[in-house]
Image (spheres, rainbow, N blue to C red):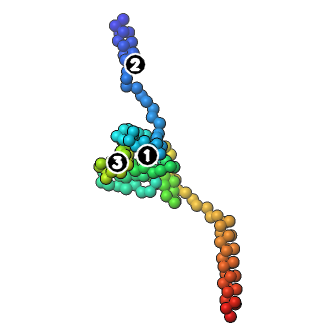
Amino acid sequence: MKKNFKLTLIILFLVFSPQRVVFSQSLSSGELIRNAKEYDGKLVVYSGEVIGDVMLRGDFAWVNINDGENALGAWMSAALAKEIKFTGNYKSRGDRLEITGVFHRACFEHGGDLDIHVRSLLKITNGRMVKENLNFDKVNLSLILLGVLFLIWILTLFKHK
């Protein structure tokens, strides 16, 4: 009887406990920028493509993450940054990350910049190299324009004689 009572109390405590598991939704950069005062110093979730370079600074690194609207700076440990294999540029698509960290609208530690101090990182998709295909329509147009330019040059040479 006492065993059932204790089990019931534990179950009731867990069900009605103020500590609930809450699944967070990723915020957009626009939302964070527009409501910077509201989110300042709070734990936020932000996701996007890693762009530019991973800039190592001792035991930490700066990473820019673009959600398609804006890019935000993320300050993370070098150990977390090692998980990033591809950064977005002309030749590649960057890894897509979901980061959780403390948002700062004017970070005292980093000269007043808006940033996120990352506590955890989840790789949503891996980046990849992008193969650029030759656009033959543009090649043909370039050759036609080169021919027209050559024709104009020849005509101006004969005109001046």
Q: Which residue is mark 1?
A: 33
Q: Is residue 150 above or below residue 2?
A: below
Q: Is residue 139 above or below residue 34?
A: below
Q: Quadrant of the C terminus?
A: bottom right
Kindly report the distance in space between the C-alpha atoms of the residues bearing marks 3 and 1.
11 Å
Looking at the rendered image, the disc whose residue lies closer to the viewer, 2 or 1, is: 1
Q: Say whether residue 41 is visible.
A: yes
Q: Say whether residue 86 is visible.
A: no
Instruction: Check residue 106 in the rendering and tell me which mark sits there, or answer none.
Output: 3
The residue that appears at 64% across and 64% down in the rendered structure is 135
**Direction from residue 138 to residue 102 in the image, left or right:** left
Label 3 Cα crowd, 10 Å radius (few <14 / some 14-19 / many 20+):
some
Given residues 49 and 42, the one toward you in this image is: 42
- Number of dots carrying numbers: 3
| Labels 2 and 3 touching (C-beta < 8 A) | no
Q: Position of residue 48 (x, y in %)?
A: 48, 47
Q: Earlier in the sequence, mark 3 or mark 1?
A: 1
Q: Position of residue 112 (x, y in %)?
A: 33, 51
| Label 1: element kind | helix
Identify the amino acid type marked 1.
Answer: Ile
Q: Is residue 21 above or below residue 102?
A: above
Q: Which residue is mark 2?
A: 16
Q: Position of residue 40 (x, y in %)?
A: 36, 41
Q: Earlier in the sequence, mark 2 or mark 3?
A: 2
The residue that appears at 43% across and 30% down in the rendered structure is 22
Identify the amino acid type marked 3.
Answer: Ala
